[in-house]
Amino acid sequence: AQSVTQLDSQVPVFEEAPVELRCNYSSSVSVYLFWYVQYPNQGLQLLLKYLSGSTLVKGINGFEAEFNKSQTSFHLRKPSVHISDTAEYFCAVSLLSSGNTPLVFGKGTRLSVIA
Amino acid sequence: DSGVTQTPKHLITATGQRVTLRCSPRSGDLSVYWYQQSLDQGLQFLIQYYNGEERAKGNILERFSAQQFPDLHSELNLSSLELGDSALYFCASSVSVGETEAFFGQGTRLTVV
């Protein structure tokens, strides 16, 4: 079975500083990779996804992530954060197959942007 | 707005009771997923339906059940509720079984007292 580890439960960062949220996954087969964001009292919103092709994926709100197959990682980055980026971020995987592939989520990383 | 609608937004009920959570997927989406979000367990996949049929089961308790109706809306039934069932329950939908992107509702916050 696949699993996702988000290495930091909380990340405080100053406004306009860069940030990296780390995600490692474990799977015996190829996977799709996702980052979702959850703002307070909201549902989850897709930031970006990796299905195939270029390992550098650009998403919404200036975020990007890089798929590293050898390190089984999919870290999320933003060069300059804003106060409005304060939220919970979830890394997720689903199996690369034509069958039933529900998302498996990490525990989440709470990003706090400090003015 | 993701297009996925969940009702009610909040629910407070007593232990031992039964509740029903409702989800309307995005127009055109055939697949519905239910997730439970709690502080200690994080986001746990419960169950998936595709076009009315159960397709995948996750960590769903026997006290919980779900179904997807012909109009594609889904209901999650939680019975014999315990304090530990207090959580945020999310519904998500996607176009096909292969989930390249799932759209989430805003969730139903269940509090069991």
Image: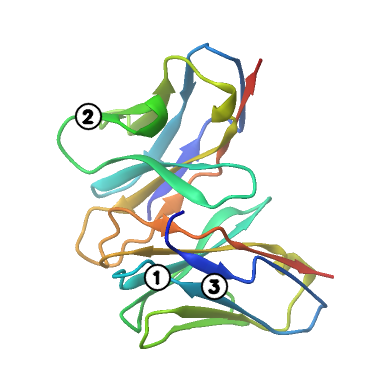
Classed neighbour count for the residue bearing mark 3: other residues with Cα under 10 Å, few (<14), some (14–19), many (≥20): some
Q: Nearer the viewer, residue B46 or B14?
A: B14
In the depicted structure, whether residue A46 falls above or below residue B31: above
Name the residue carrying label 3.
Answer: B60
Amino acid tagged 2: Thr
Question: Outermost residue toward the left?
Answer: A53
Marks 3 and 1 on same chain? yes
In the depicted structure, whether residue B92 falls above or below residue A34: below
Amino acid tagged 3: Ile
Marks 2 and 3 on same chain? no
Q: In which quarter of the image is residue B89?
A: bottom right
The image position of residue A43, as x and y in percent, is 54, 52
| In the displayed structure image, the side of residue B38 where residue B66 appears, left or right | left
Name the residue carrying label 2.
Answer: A55
Label for residue B32? 1
Q: Quadrant of residue B37?
A: bottom right
SS assignment at label 2 = loop
Location of the N terminus of chain A by quadrant is bottom left
- Of tags 3 and 1, the one toward the viewer is 1
The image position of residue B113, as x and y in percent, is 85, 70
| In the displayed structure image, the side of residue B97 where residue B37 appears, left or right | right
Classed neighbour count for the residue bearing mark 2: other residues with Cα under 10 Å, few (<14), some (14–19), many (≥20): some
Q: Residue at x 42, y 15 (%)?
A: A79
SS assignment at label 1 = strand
Q: Mark 3 lies on which chain?
A: B
| In the displayed structure image, the side of residue B49 where residue B9 appears, left or right | right
The image position of residue B19, as x and y in percent, is 68, 81
Q: Quadrant of residue B10?
A: bottom right
Q: Which residue is drawn at 30% across and 67% down?
A: A100
SS assignment at label 3 = loop
Cα–Cα span, label 3 and label 1 = 15 Å
